[in-house]
Image: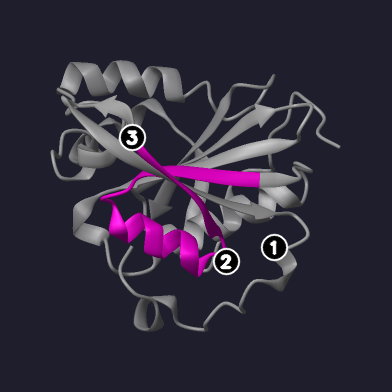
Amino acid sequence: MVTVPWAPEYPVVTPRLRLRPHRLDDLDDLLRFHSDIEVVRYIPWPVRTRSQTEAALEARTRQGVVFEPGQWLVLAMELDGRVIGEMLLKYDSETDARGELGYAMAADVEGHGYATEAARAMLDLAFGPFGLHRVVARLDARNGASARLLTRLGMRQEAHLREDEYFKGEWTDTLVFGILASEWPARPPRPPHPSAQEAPE
């Protein structure tokens, strides 16, 4: 059962990362990928200037606690003191105990399994202390790297919606992936060396 307000104990530690609420001094790290046209190609926000990133960061500093359905938990992915990306978990529905997973990451650290590692930690939170029944992920159908990441997590593709969204000037398809709490413990075991054994994000 989900009880709000809710937040995990910070930082959430994985083998290589620390997941924590954003701080204002994350600006330079955040700008590195919020301003990258390739990173935001399939993400709802536009390529951001420094001032736009600063405004987005200010809002993110208040997103380390979920107070009600519809809100996103947004956590910085910290590696050796640098924020390399962010993980998002939306408390989508109280009645259905449903969440939605999302992420963004700097291009220069892709391919080392960091996003997969952080996403596993978020699903552990979603199905553990947060008490969700189901988590979904929605992505642009052209985003093959994200589809492969979700598959590695044990999520299944449940829908392919044709031209359902007018996104950044064009009609695009959406893929919907999902996983149930009852399925999460049955996920494949984590490899001992994710950077060596996992495909790029």
Q: Earlier in the sequence, mark 3 or mark 2?
A: 3
**Image position of 128 (left or right of 91):** right
Q: Residues within 10 Å of mark 1 (few under 14, many from 20)?
A: some
Residue displayed at 63% across by 38% down: 99
**Image position of 11 (left or right of 87):** right
User: Which residue occupies the foreground of this view, 154 or 119?
Assistant: 154
Identify the amino acid type marked 2: Gly
Residue displayed at 71% across by 54% down: 180
Q: Are marks 1 and 2 in contact (CB under 8 Å)?
A: yes
Residue displayed at 43% across by 77% down: 194
Look at the image and say whether residue 159 sits in the magenta stretch: yes
Residue at the disc numbered 3: 26
Q: State the quadrant of the C terminus.
A: bottom left
| Relative to 168, residue 40 above or below | below
Magenta-tinted stretch: 135-162
Q: Position of residue 47 (x, y in %)?
A: 17, 29
Identify the amino acid type marked 1: Trp
User: Which residue occupies the foreground of this view, 18 or 199?
Assistant: 199
Q: Position of residue 138 (x, y in %)?
A: 45, 42
Residue at the disc numbered 1: 184
Using the numbered discs, state the Cα–Cα distance from disc 3 to disc 2 in whole angstroms.
Answer: 31 Å
Q: Earlier in the sequence, mark 3 or mark 1?
A: 3
Decide if residue 194 is in sight here: yes
Quarter of the rendering containing residue 26: top left
Look at the image and say whether residue 139 sits in the magenta stretch: yes
Q: Position of residue 39 (x, y in %)?
A: 21, 44
| Relative to 131, residue 107 above or below | below
Using the numbered discs, state the Cα–Cα distance from disc 3 to disc 1 in whole angstroms.
Answer: 32 Å
Name the outermost residue toward the front: 162
